[in-house]
Every structure is written in C-alpha cells, then in structure tokens.
Amino acid sequence: MNAGAEEEEIQEDEITPHSLAIQIIDIICQSLSSKMFLRPLMEFIMQHKDHPSPFFRRSALSILTIMSESCSDQLKNSLETLLQIVLTSFHDKDKKVREAACLTLSQFATHLSPEINQYHQQILPILYEAVHDPRIPMKLNACFALETFCENMEEKEICLYLPKLVQSLLQLLHSHSHSPSVIQVMELALSALGSIATAAGKSFSVYFPDVMSVLLSCLNLTNDAYLVLRVRATNCVACVFNVIELEVSQSYINQVMELAIAGLDLEFAELREATYELFSNTSDLLREKYEPFLPLTVKYLLASCRSNEGVFSLPSENEESEVGKSLSELLPEIKPTKVPKSEKKS
C-alpha cells in the first residue's frame, strides 16, 4: 500500500495508485474467500491506523470500509476494537481521514447491524458534530451514516437523542445556499429524517409541526434542479404518516395530498414512485376517510398501469440470432498473417 501514501492532495475523481489499490482490494474481497486476505489486511490496518502519514491512516479506514461488507461476520467479532479506530479517526487532524472515518462508520451501520447498535452512546454524539462540519463531504457522509444507523435503532434508544437529531437535520434543511452540493446535503438530511421518524414511531409526533413546515416547502418545488429534493421530502412525509396518529396529522393531509397530486404532472418517474408510496401510507392512516382522494388517485394509478414507460421487450431467439449474424457480417474477416522466416528465427 506504499503507492497510496503520496504526500500530495488527492482529488476525489483523480485516478491514483491509492484509488487503484483500493479498487483492487475491493475486487479481491468480493471474489475470494476471506481466509485468503483477512489476516494481511487486518495486519495492515492495525499497523497503519496511527501512522504519521495521513495517507496510510486513510488507507486503513478505506480497507475497513470495504471489509465491512465482505467480512461482516469476522468484523463483528472485533467490533469494539475496530469501532474505536473509526471513532478516534473522527478527531484526526487531516480532513480526508475524518471524511474516510465518517464513510466507514456509515458502512459499519449498514453491514454490522444489529451488533453495532449497542454503541449508540458513542456513535451519535460523534455524528452530531460531523453534521455541522463546514466541509460538504463530511456533511454528506454524516447524513448517510445517520440514515443507516438510526433506521435500525429501537424506539426507546432513539428517543434519548431525538431533540438533537431533529434539530441538527432541520438546521441543514434551513440552508440559504442553493448550490448543487448543498442541495445534495439537504436530500440526505431528508432521508435521515425519514429513518429517524420510522425508528421513533409515535414519539416523533412532538417534532411533527416543525418538520412539516420544512417538508411542505420542499413539496412546492418545481424546478428540475430541485426535483430529487422534492422526492426525498415526499418519501419523508410518507415515513412520518406511517408512524403518527391521525389526530396529529389531520390538519396537514389535504395540503399534502394536493401538492402530491400536483407533482404527478411534473412527469418525473422517481417522484411518481414516492408519491404512490405516500398515497399508500395516507390511505392506511385515513382508512375510509381516504374516499375523497380516490378519484384522482385511481386516475393516476391506472395511467401508470397503462404506460409503457420503462418497459422493453426482450428479443426472441430468432431475433438474437439475426443480430448475431448481422454483427458477424460487419466484423472484418481476420486472416492469419504469415511470419517471415527471418522473424521466426529471431
């Protein structure tokens, strides 16, 4: 891994010996038995987690990120030790190492659950700080980590952190900047908020008014640049409606449904999918009171059923053979080239 230790600033999309080495390790972990690579990789991690060079420390975390998926059972056996490496790296003086630690933690939350949930007292305070980091990559990784970690928490556990969690994410959603990177942070913040609502259940009702004011604002977005943000807001509303009582949400339902139905005319496939999920959760919430929304709901559902958008037909065997034949006709015939005797001798 010496190739990964260049003492220079590495650009995110730049192809470097470091990035290539990590990609190759990923392929190895996905393709071979862990018996063939677990020990040398763990030795590298333990030897370089405190290395003077930030590139070595970052490499150790990158390998942990990869291994969390392919070696989850083995990592669970050493979870406490490995988690301390990751959490300590959140305070590293190098920004790239801190970002790598946040990404590693999000992958731990994804692949090392439910065992990792018992460490919520150590993990969530760290993520509070990361969400407010001035660097966009850190915010993105922190929001993703919150989403994956909180969705697996029990209600009694997450309720201890609800005030700070909701406040931190709402602050991100009240940003005055509309740059693409900030919009991306807001999208992930909404996804995290949906996961928190799902885990918190009825306890989320206390924060419902403040959250809904932000969500309604997002549901009014029509600019193409903000449609994914509107999708995430629609998903979040669906999550919230799935866990709270009708008495809490009733005053918002008409406005939400009006905006959701209007969004279907934007012809954005991902928004349609999110809206149909919202229809489902709203009908569960309202039961027979959903009847006024049925005509328009059914109209759009039937239109989607009749649509051939995203539908394609596979070629028949005869068509496949014809395609193969036509391709072979296009390819030039390759004839063996005779090698001169003088070249053969050499």
Image (spheres, grey):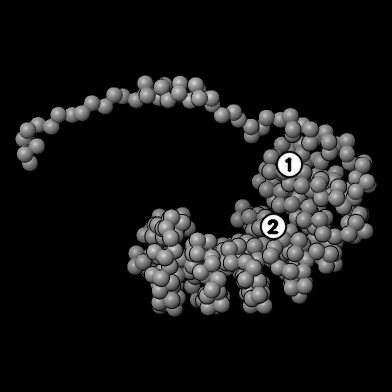
Report how far apart the C-alphas of labels 1 and 2 lie in the structure: 17 Å
The kind of secondary structure element at disc 2 is helix
Callout 2 amino acid: Ser
Q: Are marks 1 and 2 in contact (CB under 8 Å)?
A: no
Along the line of sight, which residue is nearer the eye, 88 or 78?
78
Q: Residue 158, how many percent across, how many down? A: 74, 71
The 10 Å Cα crowd at callout 1, few under 14, some 14 to 19, many 20 or more, is many
Q: Residue at x 82, y 59 (%)?
A: 243
Q: Of residues 53 and 179, which is closer to you in this image?
A: 53
Place of residue 29 in the rendered image (x, y in percent of width and height, measured from the top left): 44, 60
- Residue 20 lies, in percent from the top left, at 39, 57
Which residue lies at the image location 39% right of the left edge and 60% below the top edge? 21
- At x 41% / y 22%, what residue is drawn? 325
> How many marks can you see?
2
x and y percentages locating residue 53 in the rendered image = 40, 74
Q: Which of the two discs, 1 and 2, labels the residue nearer the N terminus?
A: 2
Which of the image's four quarters has the C terminus? top left
Depicted 118 relative to depicted 194: above or below: below
Which quarter of the picture shows residue 237? bottom right
Q: Is any atom of residue 175 visible in this view?
A: no
Name the quarter where the N terminus is drawn.
bottom left
Report the disc number at residue 191. Answer: 2
Return the residue at label 1.
272
Give left or right: position of 331 versus 141. left
Tell me which residue sits at (34%, 68%) in the image: 2
**Is residue 265 in view from this perspective?**
yes
Apparent side of residue 115 relative to residue 245 in the rendered image (left or right): left
Question: What's the amino acid at mark 1?
Answer: Arg
